[in-house]
Image (spheres, rainbow, N blue to C red):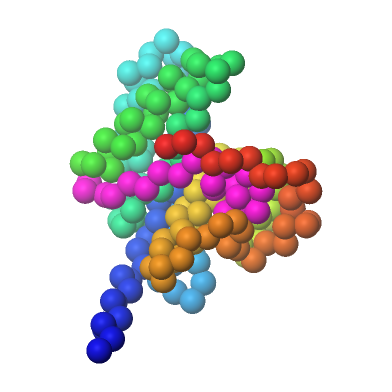
Amino acid sequence: MPFPAQPVPPPVRILGVDPGLNVTGYAVLDPSGRVLKVCEAGVIRTDDLDAPDLSRRVRVLYDGLLEVIDQYRPGVLAVEQLFAHYDHPRTAVLMAHARGCFLLAAALRNLPVKSYPPARVKKTITGSGRAGKEQMQNAVMRELGLPKPPEPHDVADALAIALCHHYMAAAAAVGATPAGTVTRVNRDRLAPTDGDDAPDEAA
């Protein structure tokens, strides 16, 4: 006797965040309709604050994200995994401060967090783990039917992270694991042939 099909959970709003200590991009996607709807997208800025005042910057980021969460009530936070390049260790440390305050904000609102390596986001959206900023902006524009590429790139990255979670969650719901591009984007137009894609980062 076959087992009954498991019910597919209803889609929930997705809050995508591209963390940065100076500028953080955020985007809220609603997948409940026939097409993905961009509820809101923007940036939280701290680059106009005193550079040495790290605690004040973190507070501004924390308060800003809580405001977005409380206004749009997302069901999940999708965030990029921390990327550390050996040539720029200080950048990773500063990024970690921003990312940590966002994880705390999510935890205080009982919001589950899903984390994706940068290369996975790029590969899912464009087909190439090495896609540049302009390729990502064009891909996000086409996927969401926007009239022009989203700017600044922090917003485009936040939209891409939210889109990545949407497609990964949809694939998981039917028991599949996307191996590459799962969007409608024409890879040949957006991602030049440059050999093998960069591997996903370790978690």
In which quadrant will I find the N terminus? bottom left
The quarter holding residue 87 reads top right
Q: Is residue 2 magenta?
A: no
**Res 45 visible:** no
Q: Is residue 115 left or right of residue 144?
A: left
Residue nearest the viewer, comparing 190 with 130:
130
In which quadrant will I find the C terminus? top left
Query: For the view shown, which residue lies furthest in the front direction?
Result: 1
Q: Is residue 147 left or right of residue 162?
A: right
Q: Is residue 29 left or right of residue 150?
A: left
Q: Which x, y percent locates residue 9?
A: 31, 70
**Res 100 visible:** yes
The quarter holding residue 33 reads bottom left
What's the residue at 51%, 72% (across, down)? 35
Q: Is residue 119 magenta?
A: yes
What's the residue at 44%, 48% (across, down)? 16
Magenta region:
109-129
What's the residue at 31%, 57% (across, down)? 75
Position of 5 relative to 22 (above/below) = below
What's the residue at 66%, 48% (across, down)? 128
Position of 76 relative to 132 (above/below) = below
Position of 52 relative to 61 (above/below) = above
Residue nearest the viewer, comparing 139 with 153:
139
Q: Which x, y percent locates residue 32?
A: 40, 71
Query: For the view shown, which residue lies furthest in the bottom direction?
Result: 1
Q: How many marks?
A: 0
Q: Which x, y percent locates residue 95?
A: 45, 26
Q: Is residue 146 left or right of residue 63?
A: right
Position of 6 relative to 16 (above/below) = below
Q: Which x, y percent locates residue 82?
A: 45, 32
